[in-house]
Structures are given as C-alpha cells and as structure tokens.
Image (spheres, rainbow, N blue to C red):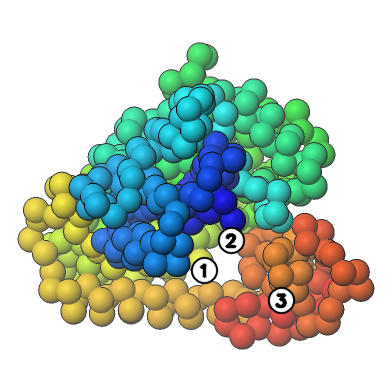
Amino acid sequence: MSVEVINFGCRLNIAEGEAIRAAAAGADDLIVINSCAVTAEATRQARQAVRRAAKRRPDARIIVTGCAAEVDPAMFAGMAEVVGNRAKGQATSYHALGTNGLSRPALSGADHARAFVEVQNGCDHRCTFCIIPYGRGESRSVPAGLVIDAVKQAVDRGQQEVILTGVDLTSYGPDLPGNPTLGMLVERILTHVPELKRLRLSSMDSVEIDDRLFDLISGEARIMPHIHLSLQSGDDMILKRMKRRHSRVEAVELVKRLKAKRPALTIGADIIAGFPTEDEAMFANSLALLDDCDIVLGHIFPFSPRTGTPAARMPQLARATVKARAETLRTRASERKASWLQSLIETRQKTLIELDQKSGHAENFASVRLETPLPLSNMRGTMVDVQITASDGHTLTGIPV
C-alpha cells in the first residue's frame, strides 16, 4: 500500500497508471490521482478523490496528475502536489532519478486479463468542445519497435488480448521517421507477435481510417470485430461547429462498407447531446445516426462546457434540454444494444475470462456472464467458448462448453 494509483477516464489513462506505478515504485506512502478532464464531472470526481484520499490516509503524500491537473493546476492548489502529463511516467516526479518522454509506452498491469498499450499521445486537432489537447499537448507516436516489445511483454506474461490506445489513435505515425500509419503498425504487431490471439483498437476518428487500416479491420481475424468511432454528432452543421473533419454521409458510408465486408462487426460510438446551437432537427439527425451507423454500443455524453474552449463561448442550451436529449439518446442506444444481445442468444461466443473469473468479453465486445462455474480455480485470462442462453439487455449469460 506504499504506492496507490487511482485512475480516472480513458483507456490510455489506465495504461499510464501502470507506468506511474512503475515509476513511483519504492516511494514511501504515496497516493497518485491520475485525473481526467473530458467533462466538468470528471474534474469534480478528481477533486473528490483527493479529499477522500487525504481523509483515508492523512499521512500520505498526495500527487494529482492527468488532464485535469494539466489544464487547471490551480484547482488542486493546497490540496495536493501537481505533476504534468508529460512527467507522469517519469521516476523524477516521485524520486530523484528517471526517464522522460514516450521512450517506453505505458502498459497496463499483469493483473488484468487484457493489456492496454499506449501507442500515441496528444492531439493536433482542436475540436471546439475538447479540452484534452490543452492537457496532453501535440500528437506524439511511440516507435513501432517499442510498441512490439510492450505487446510481447504482455503476451509473455499470459495476456491473450491487447488493446492499442491513444488520445487520437488514428493520427499515429507522421512524427516518426518514414511516416508510418496505424495500419502499418498493426501489420507489424501481427507479424512480429504471432502468439498474440486478440488485438483490439480503442476509439478511432472515422475520417482517418485509410485503405490499409480498413482492410485490416474488415478482413483480419486476429483484429477483434469491434470498433469504437469518435462521431460526436449526426448533423453536418453541428459537426462543422464542433470542427470535426467528417460529414454525416462519410460516417454512414464507412460503416456500410465495413459491415459489407465483415457483417458481424460491432459498432460503438461517442455522441454528444445538446451541443450549443443544436435545434430539434439537428438532434433528430444524431438520434437517427444510431440506426444509420448500426451503433449498438453508444457512449452518450451530455454537452459539458469546458472553460477555455470555443464551444464554451457559443450560445448554450438550457441544461434541462441537454439532459433530456442525452437521456433520449441513451434510451435509444440501450434499446439497440438489447436487441443486438438478444440476437446472440443460442450462438457460441469465445470469451476472455476477466477479473472476477465469472465474466468477460466476447470477441465482439459483448459482456458475457457464466451461468455455471468453471472447473478450475484460476481461469482469469483464459479463453472459453460459451453457449449463450439468455440476455438481460445489458449482459449475455451462457454455459461454458
């Protein structure tokens, strides 16, 4: 309990949490809050975590890092020490010696059934609603050799699934010699780590999925049949005001092409409800996008104005309207998810058993719970064929075969 790391936010933060743990190893009585700033609620949770930590371990040294600490360090003044995002993985932040930059990609811990590997950090785009580029800096890519080493490390310690993570994953490569792409990185991983059973890609910008990456997603069996797209809206005018780089038609066409090649592909997406100036017709376009892009794993955000972003200065909708639209989107997303899960009853799903040894995720990212216990005491990280018998609308239930 000497070093405790509390992570908030994205998969990249989870991976970086392990880098923090490694960098801080040996530190005496230390708590590190690895914060998120994607919404005002995320920042509030980080502040709450600092207060709880101070109450629970009053003698501990408390450090806050992550995007909330980077964007607004003064918010944590007097509560904790602040370490910037670029220094969070450096031992010098916690000790006297250390390394810097992205020399080693963050890799989540061996106690997880799935390993998150950082391949990219930062963002060169400036979507009008997003505070993250101010907290993460410009886009930086991890050289392929170091990524492959991290993937091999995960496989060698028994992890059969690796998830590639980044702030803007599909922007991987132009800052490296030879201008590699994410598709080229994926090809190299699959070639050089043939023992890797499952490779999954975290959130991607649809407009940056080039032909090479498209072919891999649609045709490579070791890449899981599940993608998560950063769509944000289904209305072209709102997309322009968000400063997104894709149109509604482009998003719908991409999904149509992918599903034509790989019909079982699961589509997840981020959508923001109640963006400034969004009227009823614009919102209706976002609602219809759930159907038009066959989204069954919707991640719905009510718009949250972040100080310092252009969207915070735009004409705002009433909070009640924002919340109501978010709830409508969530209801429709839940209905679509329930229908999708219902369609999987009586199928067989290869499931990676996770922490509680009673549940896990199928290749298509459906949550699966085991109806009967496994015969062995420690099955975490094991792949099991599960005959699906039921669904409660959120999780599948099945019998291990």
Q: Which residue position is annotated with label 3?
A: 369
Residue at the extreme right of the image, as rendered: 375
Q: Earlier in the sequence, mark 2 or mark 3?
A: 2
Question: Few, some or many C-alpha atoms within 10 Å of disc 2 (few <14, some 14-19, many ≥20)?
Answer: many
Q: Earlier in the sequence, mark 3 or mark 1?
A: 1
Q: Is residue 188 left or right of residue 122?
A: right
Instruction: From the viewer's side, name the closer residue of 341 and 3.
Output: 3
Q: Earlier in the sequence, mark 1 or mark 2?
A: 2
Residue name at image x 33 percent, y 45 percent: 81
Q: Is residue 128 left or right of residue 351?
A: left
User: Alpha carbon of mark 2 to alpha carbon of mark 3: how far?
Assistant: 19 Å
Asked if residue 391 is positioned above or below residue 308 in the image, the reply reads below
User: Alpha carbon of mark 1 to alpha carbon of mark 2: how far?
Assistant: 7 Å
Coordinates of residue 209 in the picture (x, y in percent):
48, 39
Question: Few, some or many C-alpha atoms within 10 Å of disc 1 (few <14, some 14-19, many ≥20)?
Answer: many
Q: Which residue position is annotated with label 1?
A: 296
